[in-house]
Amino acid sequence: VQLVESGGGLVQAGGSLRLSCAASGTIFSRNVMGWYRQAPGKQRELVALIVSAGITNYADSVKGRFTISRDNAKNAVYLQMNSLKPEDTAVYFCNSKGPSFVRDYEDSWGQGTQVTVSS
């Protein structure tokens, strides 16, 4: 399984960014897709999840500001981030959980994309 993130960068507080994650090697439509983040000196934490049927779950800290979506036809998951705050600064990782072409279950991670929010 390969997950490739894109869309990170530097933005001012109050701004927006859209992260994308392209997946390959996985039976995408049957995977739970998620975005996690890790700030310096902190543990990796869940930001948002989306299951194949489109049901979503968000960390309290991002509810109302971030939106996760997926396009099963393109094997892609997105994270629209609005009203960004300096505390959103972190490396954002794409994650997939579920069947791949070679295993019944894989828990896979992308390499991460840096999001920096300036005050």
Image (tube, helix red, strand yellow):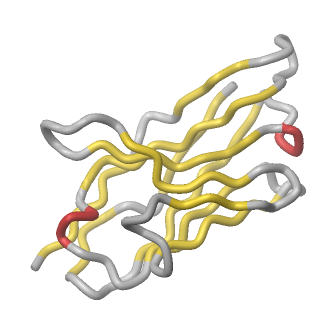
User: Where 104 sits versus 7, above or below?
Assistant: above
- Compared with 3, 116 (above or below) is below
- Most foreground residue, 67 or 11: 67
In this rendering, the answer to whether 22 lies above or below 10 is above
Q: Residue at x 62, y 58 (%)?
A: 57
Q: With respect to residue 14, does 91 lie above or below?
A: above
**In the image, what residue occupies the spot 70% across and 41% down?**
23
Number of marks present in the image shown: 0
Q: Residue at x 67, y 56 (%)?
A: 77
- How far across and how far down the image is residue 66, in percent? 50, 73
Q: Where the C terminus falls, by quadrant?
A: bottom left
> Residue 13 at x, y = what percent?
21, 82
- Residue that protrudes farthest toward the top in the picture: 103
Tell me residue 4's x, y (percent): 56, 42
Report the residue at 31% width, 64% height from top. 9
Image coords of residue 58 (percent x, y)? 54, 61
In the picture, measured across the screen, residue 90 lies left or right of residue 109, that is left
